Amino acid sequence: MDSDLDPQFLNLAHKLLAASQSAPVSILQRLLKQGAPAWYQDEELGWSCLHYAAERKEPECLRVLLEGGAVWNAVDKWGRTAGEVCLSLGDEEGWEIIRNEGIRSEMLHHALAGPSSPASDSSTNIKLRAEDKTSAGDNLTFLKSKLTWDVGDDGKERVLDADGNGVMMGWEEPLMAEHVRLMTEEHPNAQPGAEGMSILNVGYGLGIVDRLFQNPLSPDQPKPAHHTIIEAHPEVLEYIRSKGVHLIPGVRILEGRWQDWLLDPEKIGEVLSATPGGMGFDAIFVDTFAEGYEDLKAFFEVIPDILDAENGIFSFWNGLGATNATIYSVSSALAELHLEDVGLEVEWHDVLIPESLREEVWQGVRRRYWELPGYRLPIGKMRLM
């Protein structure tokens, strides 16, 4: 509350907010030198000085405020960053300045933090979206929550957690189908007469991607020779058994979190035992729930140990920050840079998803996890020397 702040501090904060709307850059610089807090957001709109400056379409104002401590991903009362203000005004240059600062600051954070080690408490994870205290914001809380399977107003099956958050929803199927197509159609072990691919999927959800892997694109394409699924939620495991997924030839269910299997030197050997010669999977897909970017980055660092180096393909559900165009762009760019760090080259495929914006998709869902008209689909392959 403003009433709890030092009056002099508050005075400087409001002066900077006002100056950000129309004052010369020199005034902004002077206020920042005097200690004006560039991170401060007003109580009425939740706007920061960066939001107000974005309306001016003057790149130098944005640069000065970001250098002075403005927060690139501060959101207002409607969940919009200053980047969205730029986009609404067609200011691509301003948006790129904010987006690039987001990439720079997040990369610096990770460089200072050192090697990733997923925390048992995800509140320590870097957040690329607003704080969420429900089971959608913490994986360990989610794993203890009760899940509900039903059919939404759009006629598609969905899974909701105890807080009414969408865990996985049927509208995702066309995107999952594109993931599977890009991961399988050109792989040598998926060609007619081949032995079939070795698949690893982390996170079962509704089983959409696993069903798609088990149903080849064409009649002469072989089914997977090995198909490993890692899943931790007790109710999802029960759902898997009720559907008889574990009885499908070549399918293996590993119960527990991926961290339990892939970060344990002894267990990782058991995971790899299903692959030809124990050398790595042909395709790896990961789609977990209630994990932050820090967890995803930690998964990236395991990939060189479990992906076939010659022909292996990696992909993941690219959904972090998907209610905000600027945060989503930063998250995608960050993932590409970190995948490059571990030796993977990434190719992006842009997919339109207007279906996800229809109101009936989100009826009865507490938290929307997607509000963007497009999806950036990543395909990663090991960079050969």
Image (cartoon, grey):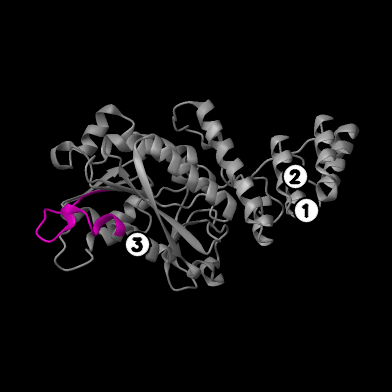
Q: Which residues are magenta?
A: 182-201
Look at mark 1 in the image and give the residue it sits on: 45
Q: Is residue 249 left or right of residue 325?
A: left
Residue 193 shows in the view? yes
How much space separates mark 1 and mark 3, taking CA atoms? 39 Å
Instruction: Tell me the tag on residue 156.
Output: none
- The mark closer to the camera, 1 or 2, is 2
Residue at the (48%, 26%) spot, across then down: 114
Look at mark 2 in the image and give the residue it sits on: 61
Image location (x, y in percent) of residue 249: 15, 55
Report the front residue among 363 and 43: 43
Look at mark 3 in the image and give the residue it sits on: 178
Residue at the (71%, 51%) spot, across then down: 76
- Considering only vertical position in the picture, is 274 above or below 219? above
> Tag 1, which secondary structure?
loop
Residue at the (51%, 28%) spot, across then down: 111
How much space separates mark 1 and mark 2, taking CA atoms? 20 Å
How much space separates mark 2 and mark 3, taking CA atoms? 41 Å
Which of the 4 image quadrants contains residue 300?
top left
